[in-house]
Image (tube, helix red, strand yellow):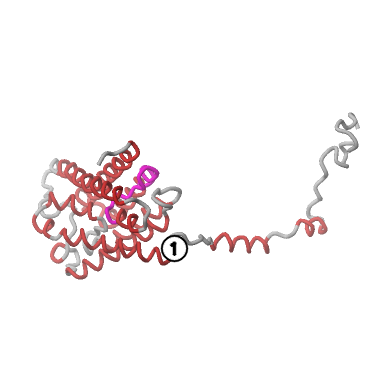
């Protein structure tokens, strides 16, 4: 497939964004978990996504997540070819980001990365020892929330305005709940990159974190189409409500004039006011 300049920019944005998400967000769990705890890790994921969504959202939509790209594809916002390009870029970006993180982690004396390295897991690799079924359900539901909010706050593909705030806060919330359960994947690329370098049980369990988020994303796309059907007229309840409140809150101008609260506006010069006669284009000077 030959990429045109626009596709090159969007694919490069997805590669770079996923690389940075893995390096900084997963890096917070690998390098600083003992200092910032689960709350700090959740905020690191949320803030990183928020920053990247502002930086890359207007370019590629800043998906940085194969589950989000799948939902966009199912909603018809992107073509299949674009989705495939995004998936390749995201997976490669996650692997490169994890490789750079491993290189940095190796410079820290006594830091072990074997079998852990910010990877996701269940059973003995879960802080609460959640079983396989519970981990699968958790990942489906958490991904559903993230992707549903993503679809709701974006127009077509781009993330603009205050959308990145909602996305960052949602990802932070997902991690506050999910970190003790499974380490909170909700992103197949984010799970695959670290699992490759962690090896052992981390890699053997990664299948769950590849499949469950995709199912959650597909469910989110379906529910979003029920709540906000494609092609349906957009009704903004807030604007209608505000318009109704203003009709009651703002008194008529005539009532204000009668009550003496405001003087009626004076006519412009040359139209019956102090400006002079209205008979000609040049009113008398000096009156």
> Residue at horizontal 23%, vertical 63%?
212
Is 56 magenta? The answer is yes
**Magenta highlight range:** 53-67
Q: Is residue 268 above or below residue 119?
A: above
Characterize the magenta stretch by its predominant secondary structure: helix
> Along the line of sight, which residue is nearer the eye, 32 or 241?
241
Neighbourhood count class around disc 1 (C-alpha, 10 Å): few under 14, some 14–19, many 20 upward: some
Is 5 magenta? The answer is no
Tag count:
1
Q: Is residue 70 above or below residue 128?
A: above
Locate residue 232 relative to residue 169 in the image: left or right: right
Q: Is residue 267 visible?
A: yes
Q: Which residue is mark 1?
A: 228
For the N terminus, the image quarter is top left
Residue situated furthest left in the rendering: 200
The secondary element bearing badge 1 is classed as loop
Rendering coords of residue 138 (x, y %): 25, 66
For the C terminus, the image quarter is top right
Residue 60 position by quadrant = top left
Rendering coords of residue 166 (x, y %): 40, 55
Q: Is residue 29 above or below residue 6?
A: below
């Amino acid at each position: 497939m030959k990429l045109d300049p626009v596709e090159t920019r969007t694919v490069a944005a997805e590669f770079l964004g996923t690389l940075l998400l893995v390096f900084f967000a997963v890096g917070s769990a690998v390098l600083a978990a003992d200092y910032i705890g689960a709350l700090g890790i959740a905020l690191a994921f949320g803030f990183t996504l928020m920053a990247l969504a502002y930086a890359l959202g207007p370019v590629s939509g800043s998906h940085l997540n194969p589950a989000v790209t799948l939902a966009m594809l199912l909603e018809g916002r992107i073509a299949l070819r674009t989705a495939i390009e995004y998936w390749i870029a995201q997976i490669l970006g996650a692997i490169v980001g994890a490789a750079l993180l491993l290189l940095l982690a190796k410079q820290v004396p006594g830091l072990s990365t074997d079998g852990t390295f910010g990877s996701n897991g269940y059973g003995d690799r879960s802080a609460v020892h959640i079983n396989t079924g519970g981990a699968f359900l958790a990942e489906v539901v958490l991904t559903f929330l993230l992707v549903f909010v993503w679809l709701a706050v974006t127009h077509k593909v781009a993330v603009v305005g205050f959308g990145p705030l909602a996305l960052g806060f949602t990802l932070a919330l997902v991690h506050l709940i999910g970190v003790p359960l499974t380490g909170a994947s909700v992103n197949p690329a984010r799970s695959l990159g670290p699992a490759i370098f962690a090896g052992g049980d981390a890699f053997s369990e990664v299948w769950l974190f590849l499949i469950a988020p995709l199912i959650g994303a597909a469910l989110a796309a379906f529910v979003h189409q029920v709540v906000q059907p494609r092609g349906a007229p957009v009704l903004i309840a807030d604007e209608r409500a505000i318009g109704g409140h203003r009709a009651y809150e703002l008194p008529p101008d005539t009532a204000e004039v009668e009550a003496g609260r405001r003087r009626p506006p004076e006519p412009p010069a040359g139209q019956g006011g102090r400006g002079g006669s209205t008979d000609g284009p040049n009113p008398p000077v000096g009156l």
